[in-house]
Amino acid sequence: MKHVDLHLHLDGAVTVAIARKLAKLQGITLPENDQELERLLTVPEDCESLTDFLKCFALPLSLMQTREGLSEAVRLVVNDLQSQGVIYAEIRFAPQLHLEQGMTQEEAIRAALEGIKKAGECIDHAAEGNMAAQIKVNLILCAMRGDGNESANEETLRLAKKWLVADGGVVAMDLAGAEALFPTGKYRELFAKAKELKIPFTIHAGEADGAESVKLALEFGANRIGHGVRSQEDPQVLQLLKENQIPLEMCPTSNRQTHAVEDMSRYPFMDYLQHGLKVTLNTDDPGIEGTTMEAEYRYMEQRFGLDEDGKRTLLQNAVDAAFTTEEVKNWMRMELGLR
């Protein structure tokens, strides 16, 4: 099965194998034992919340503080996705989190774009020998929830506008981080500017905070909602999502591990899908969570009875929701057998 992944964090996609390659490249020492390294990279079984979950990002971020490390991380993640049958992905990252060794936000963006280009060259070369399917990748720049980083978020916004393209680079913005600690309402002005500048954006909302967070994101003008799992807490929010056909970037494994949903038997994914909400299926942080798009589909099939019609609808929704051109969407439809 071929896949589309619209909600994928770069730092959350670093596997043990990728971490070792990045460390070797930069002369960084990691634990020799793979099990110990995996423990540092992956979410613990006793993870209690999204805030706890976010601690897992420290190690992968430490491997992407140079242009060389960041570029290579993107290349390796893209190649990993391609090997798993992903034909289109939007990789999101926060440039402001890659400045510890002197990079600027703009240099971080350039490095990520360089990684995509290098991955494309490798894949094109492999395709000449009929070894690989093509993958197209775009970038989403994340502003971060937090205190004292207002100027950094403004810089991300400015650079998102500067580098914005319809396809083949930076295509949108996002708001990520600890939603419960830093409410969505705090970022009204930032996204008012994004809307004024005609920068498409998605916002993590309704994950660690309730339906009100989703409502605010919709008021801001979000083109998509990251997660939105708690939208069900307010019927009015569900109606707004349905009426406006705002895509939800849902990530079951992530929602289970972060306790966005305490009881997965009540996970609203299938209800949303069956009631006409524009649901998409994604990985979020495949390295940290130990998942893939294939595993996400298998989980939804085995636990919730997702059938072939449902899978087709999810793929159609993902193509429609992608921050890309109609030409690329038509290519995806052909590749996915949707035409």
Image: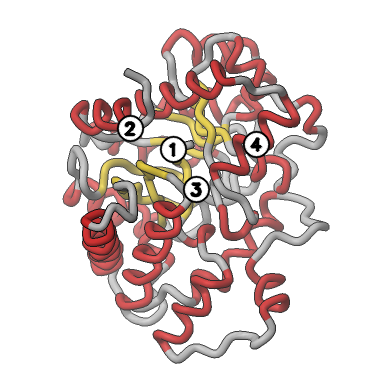
Locate the C terminus by quadrant.
Answer: top left
Q: Nearer the viewer, residue 27 or 51?
A: 27
Q: Are marks 3 and 4 in contact (CB under 8 Å)?
A: no
Q: Which residue is mark 4?
A: 298
Amino acid type, mark 3? Ala
205 to the left or right of 209:
left
Tell me the quarter of the picture where residue 174 sits: top left
Q: Which residue is mark 2?
A: 335
Amino acid type, mark 1? Lys
Say which residue appears at 50% left-offset and 29% top-offset.
280
Q: Secondary structure at mark 1?
A: loop
Q: Secondary structure at mark 2?
A: helix
Amino acid type, mark 2? Glu
Q: Which residue is mark 1?
A: 2
Q: Which residue is mark 3?
A: 176
Q: Which residue in the rendered view is the most extreme toward the front?
A: 129
**What distance separates the C-alpha of mark 1 from that of mark 4?**
13 Å
Amino acid type, mark 4? Arg
Give the vertical position of 100 relative to 250 (above or below): below
